[in-house]
Amino acid sequence: MTTRLTASRLLLGAALALGSNNPGYADETCLSPYMAKITGQEDYIYVWTLGVEGMGDEQDKLVTIDVNPKSARYGKVINSLSVGGRNEAHHSDFTDDRNYLWAGGLDTSKIFIFDVHTDPSKPTLKQVITDFVAKSGGVVGPHTTYALPGRMMITGLSNNKDHGGRTALVEYTNAGDYIATHWLPTDSDLRGAIKTGNYADGYNYDVRVLPRLNAMFTSSFTGWSNYMMDFGKMLADPEAMKRFGNTVVQWNLHTRQPKKIFDVPGAPLEIRCAWGANHNYCFTSTALTSKIWLIYFDDKGEWQAKAVADIGDASKVPLPVDISISSDDNMLWVNTFMDGKTRAFDISDPFHPKQTYEQQIGKQVNMVSSSWDGKRLYYTSSLLANWDKKGDDNEQFFKAYHWDGKTLTQQFAIDFNKEKLGRPHQMRFGAHSLYSANEPAVLTAGLLPQAADTKP
């Protein structure tokens, strides 16, 4: 695979990292700041989809949906690319040059790399990484694939020794070559980090960065032994329920050194960092305690963590899952899986989020992606193969909505069960405008190379 770090895309990424809110951007708001943004209207949504036994070809697949209202194919599935077998397809993301989409399998630990730039309407499978566990020194379950300049930073969810939550970050080149493993700090090996509370569990989930402050953050979930277990069985197992992460870790972005470990009890999942040039904070939500947490840079120049809001009725365990921040940092969308709702929080005061809206999306809902202009939101239904609801409650869908600032109005929906496609999970936007000849001026950038650290 070739690596094309175009200087123009790095310039655009740098502008975004400084908080540019160009209304011409159309892209989703949770991507790496090093990545080029779509201008105008997104053309496609790529949905990384879990195969289902007895449904269609039963394989995991990348499904391409036309989402441009001006297209004759608007609201239709226009391509479906199966990858062979069921790997517990989960999350995906682009390289910084936006030429390739990396998609992981939480069960097999395979990483599928799709060419999305040659023909954005019809991605092709370029490469499959099958030795992730061996190369990384025992990391299992590639989750977040996150773009850095010339690199992909991958969060692992588990390990091949006890299949628990002790795990690491794994770094690759855009060309698919392994670089380094960065193990999460634990009580037995803090790796130079400061433990600020009760926990140093070594668990992992998501990763995000604030380049201007040389900061990287990771959250925490659970290991293979839990995420591949039947949801009802797990809830009834007291020992299994102890095996969830309770930490957010602050890292030095350039050196990959863990700096501080924060107690964030209850499995903090997605991290979403503010875009504003002077907005030095990120949000996460906790699945098991239904809270919004703020990770913020205080007046003394230190990072801190604080619970700032409740999500729904925590006693009913609505199970917050995905979140999406608006490009102006004024709104946070929060999905709750068990009740199938999406909620909007006013976060103009990040220390005091206030819920301003909620709507039923389905009997279950998981992922949400918001466009840069805030007018379009997309939703998918699946959490994990063994955690999705059963029977009639097992709705599997992709839904597109328009947001006018007050109300969500559904534009179209695709029933993935009816279409025999499987369980839709992660969404990523695609557009022909990303690959036009009209590119901005040149800028070079990069991060420091790292030495491998492969011992847990």
Image (cartoon, rainbow, N blue to C red):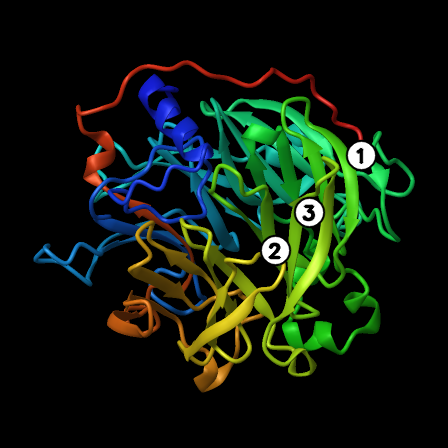
Residue 216: image quadrant is top right
- The residue at the point 26 percent across, 22 percent down is 440
Horizontal arrangement in the rendering, residue 355 relative to residue 80 (left or right): right
The residue that disc 2 covers is: 284
- Which quarter of the figure has residue 258? top right
Label 2 vs 3, first from the N-terminus: 3
Residue 448 position, x and y percent, is 60, 16
The kind of residue tagged 2 is: Thr
Helix, strand, or loop for circle 2?
strand
Q: Quadrant of the N terminus?
A: top left
Q: What residue sits right under mark 1 in the picture?
A: 456
How far across and down, in percent of the image, does residue 315 sit? 69, 82
Residue marked by disc 3 = 204
Question: Left or right: 203 with respect to 274?
Answer: right
Q: How far is the residue under mark 3 from the one under mark 1? A: 14 Å
Tell me the element at label 1.
loop
Q: Type of residue at label 1?
A: Pro
Q: Are marks 2 and 3 in contact (CB under 8 Å)?
A: no
Indicate which label's residue lies in the foreground, 3 or 1: 3
